[in-house]
Amino acid sequence: MEWTSLNDLRESYLKFFESKGCLRHKSYPLVPQNDKSLLLIVAGMAPLKPYFTGQEVPPRVRMTTCQKCIRTGDIENVGKTARHGTYFEMLGNFSFGDYFKKEAIAWAWEYVTDVLKLPLDRLHVSVYEDDDEAEKIWHEEIGVPMDHIVRMGKEDNFWEAGTDGPCGPCSEIYFDRGEKYGCGKPTCGVGCDCDRYMEFWNLVFTQFERHEDGTYTPLAQKNIDTGMGLERLAALMQGVDSIFDVDTVKAIRDHICKIAGCEYGKEYKKDVSIRVITDHIRAVTFLASDGVLPSNEGRGYVMRRLLRRAVRHGKLLGINGLFLKDLVKTVVDCNKCEYNELEEKFDYIVKVLTTEEQNFNSTIDRGMKILDEYIEKLQAEGKTTLDGESCFKLSDTYGFPLDLTREILEEKGLTADEEGYAVCMEKQRETARGARESQGYMGAEETVFHKIDKNVSTKFTGYDKTEDTGVISYLANDEDLIENAGVEDVVYIVPDQTCFYAESGGQAGDTGVIETATGKAEVLDTQKAVGGKFALKVKVTEGALTKGQAVTFKVDKAKRLATMRNHSCAHLLQSALRTVLGEHVHQAGQLVDSQRLRFDFSHFEAMTADEKAQVEALVNKYIFDALDITMEEMPIAEAQKLGAMALFGEKYGETVRVVTMGDRANAASIEFCGGTHLDNTSKIGLFKIISENSVASGVRRVEAVTGTGVLELLNSNIETINKAAETLKLNNPAELVSRCGAVMQEIKGLEKERDSLETAMANMRAKSVLENAVDVKGVSVATAQLNGVKPDVLRKMADELKAANDNVIVVMTTVNGDKGNIVVAAGKDAVAKGAHAGKIAGKIAALTNGKGGGRPDSAMAGVGDVSLIASALEKAAETAGEFIK
């Protein structure tokens, strides 16, 4: 009953359901598309929600997929058991109003018995307790004995989400692994909590509509949604006990053991770490391949959390240095036959993971040291809970996430004050992380456009024209569908076809005008609505518009042309960035309109002036080379063979549009793109970078202009230069650089003179400081408030006073604008008597809600509330006395 490999098993499943008329679709990205209800894809059916809800027409009424999924609900158990994991693949076959129970059950049984050849006597099925139909099919048509069919209740065998929406009974297939996996109880059977009866396939029969009052009515369109974990099935077929023993997963596990120099299965604690790393490296590799970057929010935080847990468990195994990059190669080799994007983006994935691993390594050692100190203190004091403020400090200051702190504490039998942590977090953040918009059933954000027949779509005709005709299929305002609109009304029209480009792929929507027999309107924007519909936002300027009218479309040609310059140039920019910076560069977002292009890309450090110059020169070379730009539609597999660049996380169909710049054999750029473009690069004119900066961890942004935008930038810069020259009273702007240099030297000279004067004046004032000193336990404590003195000057004064007086503690404050500082200095005799400038400074600063510290003889602190300085300074002598022996 052994199967060659997990990859063969996946292929056999997909081919089987292709033979049943199902469209085989490549796994969708882990990042959900147009679904704000999910951070990441958690089930095979999740990307297909619009087809189940009827919002969109599926490419075929029968589909089959092997979907990448990530679930982190049980992350704390990953590693502790042999069955928990975060990343997995879900095999599924789906029907949208086509086949139903009879076919779903028959095909499942055929695959299990004829293809997998699982022994009939060890197979069992469960059905919902009220589903007589399913039981009848299993027994009478399939031939499963009644003693191998179990009825289960709603909790186990009925699927529904929320209080309303499509739902239905389930039927599951189980495999009896044998008595050695059982609990030995007489009642042991399907549904028992022990490991004997393994559920491996769930068939969901979506046949009812649940209403808010708790009642159910039959659905007009009945659907099939099945799910089977590939790794779990592989474990079953390969006769191994866990997913970590499956061939492709085991290869990663064994590589970790080789790096760590340990053997799996010998020591529980080490096995936990090996399993954690094995699971998490799979997850973060696939997340990176779909464009997710580590961050402190959302899916980026999920990735950061997984990656840091893996690094920490590497340290527990005694692995020194960076090791994740070595494991990536094994993950890619084991999965590239189905997920070719892993190999294509290998360098990028390695760069992302290595950068994050380096960043975490730079903080983890310090964080661990501090956490160890906290733990020692807790144990010495007989306490079991680390306070929330300390947990927050570890996270905020040292990059040590709360879950990692919690995990380490649990290993010592301790807990974290998570409520206290949350209070500290709330103080720092006024708003919650990315508040979610309210969602309808299954994450469907209901809009007025959902009221339109799902079979209605808009044909785009604007690739080669800016004027066309069509029909107003629907009119709508923000609340409802309407029949007509009058002057000054701002409404949406959904046409049957249009040459107006709807915003997508980072290209702004077209503007322009439309005309009907009875009215005119200005098109303010064009957006894509649900189900392939275009929504033109218009303001009626003359007469009236009516649903069903013929309409003439006129795109603003000048804006469209300028937008195309920027869009075509964005493709050249990505190519140039990859050439200059490296193959790890991938588009992470863009916005192109008629004014400029904004291009976000994966890179991990600021571009140098030389790199920017090289990129500019290369893009302009492509422009001057007058490369032909061609657009053609082709099967996605053919496009991938050409090496066409795809946008991270984008949802592509079986047929894609490919934009090529130059000869295909030696093209400057080949990309998937549905936008509008020029027909030759020379029409871009010129390219100039305006700025380059960071927008997120590992993501940089270039803003640039093309064509007439370069001329406008040039004219603006010339005007600025001329005004600057005029201000400096120069007749020749060419002298501006030398004159600016001279002015800066003059300013530095004046600043130096000012600082000397300030220091002299401060020293004069400092002499009087000691005159007001008070004796505290045999040490002179002098205080002074010297507002307007720079902090570094104040510190110099304090150091001079302590150098001249061994038995003195000097406490001085200053306020500059709305910022205040406290400086404390202690002479060597005062230090010998117990004085500590750093502690004194920190304690006085705390009286102002500030903080700071330093060495025993010299320290500086920041003031929180400058209005509290005077009262804090009054307590300086008392505070200093606390430290003097």
Image (spheres, grey):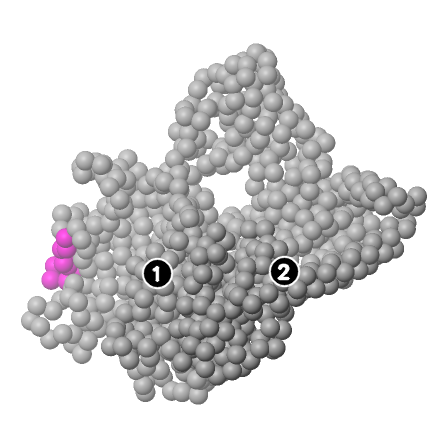
Left or right, 678 with respect to 771, comes to right
Q: Which mark is residue 790?
A: 2
Q: Kindly give the residue lying farthest to the left in the view shown.
A: 186
Secondary structure type for disc 1: helix
Magenta stretch bounds: 144-153
The residue sitting at 85% across, 56% down in the picture is 742
Observer-side mark, 1 or 2, equals 2
Q: Amino acid at mark 2?
A: Lys
The picture places residue 394, in percent across and down from the top left corner, at 41, 68
Q: Earlier in the sequence, mark 1 or mark 2?
A: 1
Residue 598 picture location, percent across and down: 64, 47
Q: Is residue 146 magenta?
A: yes
Amino acid type, residue under disc 1 in the picture: Tyr
Measured Cα–Cα span from mark 1 to mark 2: 37 Å
Position of residue 360 relative to residue 551, above or below, is below
Q: Is residue 218 above or below residue 579?
A: above
Judge by depth and name the residue closer to the eye, 601 or 665.
601
Q: Which residue is denoted by mark 1 in the rendering? A: 421
Q: At which x and y percent is residue 80?
A: 30, 74
Q: Residue furthest right?
A: 731
- The quarter in which the C terminus is drawn is bottom left
Q: Nearer the viewer, residue 596 or 464?
A: 596
- Outermost residue on the front side: it is 771
Q: Is residue 577 above or below residue 478?
A: below
> Is residue 829 magenta-colored?
no
Q: Circles 1 and 2: CB distance less than 8 Å? A: no
